[in-house]
């Protein structure tokens, strides 16, 4: 039986619409060819340009569309020159994460054998780990509400039991799935700064409590500064790592760097009910409107969306399509002759996306 799923689409700012359009084209084609599912799309205006025009960064109607949708696709939001009155940038993606309690920011880092990486990696090595960034609290708790006087500025880092327990359960479940499918050794690393901050000792305590429930998995701890070093020196040692919001924001860009750049770094912000799928990168105003944007991170985020919906709704075809889509992008990257400028090629956004369609559908 064919089931229809509605996707809320946040095209966002800068290169956002340029990478969203080919992604929605691919998803539409996959949905039309499928027999077990069909996709519809609801446009949800939001972001910095929308704020500049209307005074609203995340209109109620867009928030309602996000809540009503089966999944949410988001390209990138924010522009350096458009700011709220408090001086911070327009960032409705943070509001979405908080409003929909999307505590698990899932940011996979993979470098296949032979894929370009700035690391001098032994030929027999591959990188394959998942960084889970808590995405609703931590140092982002007072985002936009920090106290600033003439002589002092203050922000608060918040770690709660409720969110941490959900976060760690998610991390161990993911490690178990990866182990069961032969993808990883079944190890979760808690990345913190428990040597200095009581909040992180509390974080670690809750991690250890969840770890005790999973004797079949390995749990370890690493300080965030050492983790940055090891992500460069021996990234193949990680399986699932789980960390606070700000640490995860920074380390996930380092992870993107290992893969060759932000243009190939997908992500998913997942809660118990809802999820947003978006690249790790921003609106790239420096290259917007020139056809230079790499669409792969956005397309890979769409593949994560199919994975998530396929599991949630037990829709085998959708899961298979998620896998096929990811393999198509990986195939184009491995082939190496049709790449955008950030990966050393000269293909436009449209040409790179068309190569993925060819790999998927066998187009001429
Ligand atoms: N998730 C998001 O929506 C998100 C993430 C990060 C930054 N931002 C916002 O985006 C704006 C720009 O921020 P920034 O410049 O620090 O980060 P950015 O990620 O937009 O760009 C950083 C660098 O990476 C390049 N880049 C990014 N995505 C690319 C792609 N798909 N293809 C090719 N090159 C790509 C850019 O050209 C730039 O040189 C800011 O307003 C920021 O707040 C949004
Ligand atoms: C643009 C910004 C608000 C966002 C964040 O800090 O979470 C981005 O850097 C990300 O990694 O998704
Ligand atoms: Mg970031």
Image (cartoon, rainbow, N blue to C red):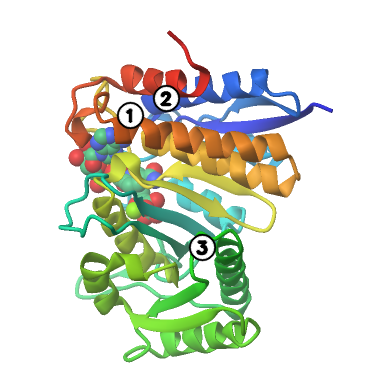
| Residue highlighted by disc 3 | 136
Location of the N terminus (image quadrant): top right
Residue 350 rendering spot, x and y as whole percentages: 35, 17
Residue that label 1 marks: 15
Label 1 crowd bin: few (<14), some (14–19), many (20+), radius 10 Å: many
Q: Secondary structure at mark 3?
A: loop
Secondary structure at numbered mark 2: helix
Q: Earlier in the sequence, mark 3 or mark 2?
A: 3
Q: Is residue 82 visible?
A: no
Give the residue pinned by disc 2: 356
Relative to 94, is 72 on the left or the right?
A: right
- Which of marks 3 and 1 precedes in the sequence? 1
Q: Check the image and report above or below for 179 versus 189.
A: above
Instruction: Point out the frontmost of discs 2 and 1.
Output: 2
Disc 1/disc 3 C-alpha distance (Å): 25 Å
Q: Mark 1: is the Cβ under 8 angstroms from ligand 1? A: yes
- Secondary structure of residue under mark 1: loop
- Residue lying at the far front of the rendered structure: 124
Q: Residue at x 21, y 72 (%)?
A: 229
């Amino acid at each position: 039986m064919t089931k229809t799923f509605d996707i809320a689409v946040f095209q966002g700012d800068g290169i956002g619409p340029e990478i969203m359009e080919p992604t929605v084209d691919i998803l539409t084609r996959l949905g039309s060819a499928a027999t077990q599912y069909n996709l519809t799309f609801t446009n949800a205006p939001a972001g910095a340009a929308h704020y500049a025009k209307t005074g609203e960064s995340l209109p109620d109607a867009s928030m309602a569309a996000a809540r009503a949708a089966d999944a949410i696709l988001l390209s990138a939001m924010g522009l350096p020159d458009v700011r709220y009155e408090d001086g911070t940038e327009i960032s409705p993606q943070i509001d979405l994460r908080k409003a929909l309690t999307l505590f698990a920011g899932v940011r996979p880092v993979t470098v296949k054998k032979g894929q370009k990486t700035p690391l001098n990696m032994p030929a027999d090595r591959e990188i394959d780990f998942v960084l889970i960034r808590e995405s609703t609290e931590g140092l982002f708790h007072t985002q936009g509400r920090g106290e600033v006087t003439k002589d002092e500025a203050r922000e608060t880092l918040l770690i709660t039991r409720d969110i941490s327990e959900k976060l760690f359960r998610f991390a161990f479940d993911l490690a178990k799935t990866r182990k069961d499918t032969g993808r990883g050794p079944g190890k979760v690393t808690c990345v913190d700064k428990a040597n200095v901050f009581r909040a992180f000792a509390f974080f670690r305590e809750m991690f250890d409590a969840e770890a005790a429930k999973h004797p079949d998995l390995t749990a370890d701890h690493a300080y965030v500064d050492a983790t940055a070093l090891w992500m460069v020196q021996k990234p193949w040692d990680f399986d699932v790592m789980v960390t606070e919001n700000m640490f995860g924001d920074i380390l996930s860009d380092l992870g993107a760097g290992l893969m060759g750049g932000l243009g190939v770094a997908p992500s998913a912000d997942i809660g118990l009910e809802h999820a947003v799928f978006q690249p790790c990168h921003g609106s790239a105003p420096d290259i917007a409107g020139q056809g230079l944007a790499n669409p792969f991170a956005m397309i890979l985020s769409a593949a994560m969306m199919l994975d998530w919906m396929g599991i949630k709704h037990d829709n085998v075809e959708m899961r298979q399509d998620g896998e096929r889509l990811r393999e198509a992008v990986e195939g184009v990257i491995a082939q190496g002759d049709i790449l955008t400028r950030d990966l050393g090629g000269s293909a436009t956004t449209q040409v790179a996306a068309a190569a993925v369609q060819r790999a998927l559908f066998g187009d001429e």
